């Protein structure tokens, strides 16, 4: 015997009956052999479960870090883009000598246009009057 120890334990009749049926189907040499293999399997299950939790936590932390970094970069880019668009907007308002009410009308028209196209510009571009 290779470094084994004799122990006694209690097991329910149902579990023992099922174990004996499975033992026959897998050609296990003895109850001891079957139980030794079952304990080794169960130990491995718990080791993998702990490793899985550790790995999952590391993956989640890594992905969260990447997403946080991406979010910061996107926020900076969107801010820069918003500043440039605002500059263009005010140059156009000034260049076309638009009144505040005309600016409000333009804004409302643009909001309605974006809602209508669901934010997706399609090419070839159709004027909103052409769709009606």
Image: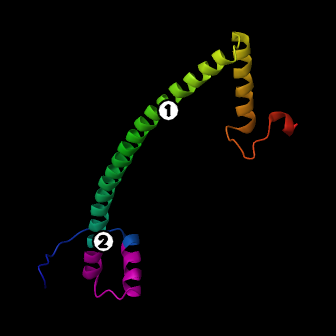
Residue annotated with mark 2: 41
Number of marks in picture: 2
Q: Nearer the viewer, mark 1 or mark 2?
A: 1
Would you say residue 23 sits in the magenta stretch? yes
**Residue 70 spot, x, y in % from top left:** 42, 41
**Residue 65 spot, x, y in % from top left:** 35, 43
Residue annotated with mark 1: 78
**Residue 57 spot, x, y in % from top left:** 33, 49
Q: Secondary structure at mark 1?
A: helix
- Position of 36 relative to 116 (above/below): below
Give the alpha-carbon distance from disc 1 to disc 2, as whole Å: 53 Å
Q: Residues within 10 Å of mark 1 (few under 14, many from 20)?
A: few
Q: Earlier in the sequence, mark 1 or mark 2?
A: 2
The foreground one among 46 and 65 is: 65
Quadrant assignment, res 93: top right
Q: Residue at x 41, y 71 (%)?
A: 14
**Residue 43 spot, x, y in % from top left:** 26, 66
Q: Which numbered circle lies on residue 31?
A: none
Would you say residue 96 sits in the magenta stretch? no
Assess whether mark 2 and mark 1 are in contact (beta carbons under 8 angstroms): no
The foreground one among 82 and 61 is: 82
User: Along the horizontal axis of the image, is 52 left or right of 111?
Assistant: left
Q: Residue at x 73, y 11 (%)?
A: 101
Q: Residue at x 61, y 22 (%)?
A: 89
Name the outermost residue toward the left: 3
Q: Residue at x 29, y 53 (%)?
A: 54
Quadrant assignment, res 126: top right
Name the outermost residue toward the right: 132
Q: Residues within 10 Å of mark 2 (few under 14, many from 20)?
A: few
Q: Secondary structure at mark 2?
A: helix
Residue stretch rendered in magenta on the structure? 16-38
């Amino acid at each position: 015997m290779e470094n084994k120890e004799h122990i006694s334990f209690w097991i329910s009749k149902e579990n023992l009956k099922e174990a004996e049926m499975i033992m026959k189907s897998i050609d296990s040499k003895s109850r001891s052999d079957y139980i030794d293999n079952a304990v080794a399997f169960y130990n491995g299950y718990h080791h993998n479960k702990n490793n899985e939790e550790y790995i999952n936590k590391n993956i989640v932390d890594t992905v969260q870090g990447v997403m946080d970094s991406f979010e910061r970069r996107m926020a900076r880019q969107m801010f820069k883009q918003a500043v440039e668009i605002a500059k263009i907007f005010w140059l156009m308002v000034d260049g076309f000598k638009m009144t505040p009410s005309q600016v409000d009308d333009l804004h409302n028209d643009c909001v309605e246009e974006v809602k209508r196209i669901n934010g997706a510009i399609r090419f070839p571009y159709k004027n909103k009057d052409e769709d009606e």
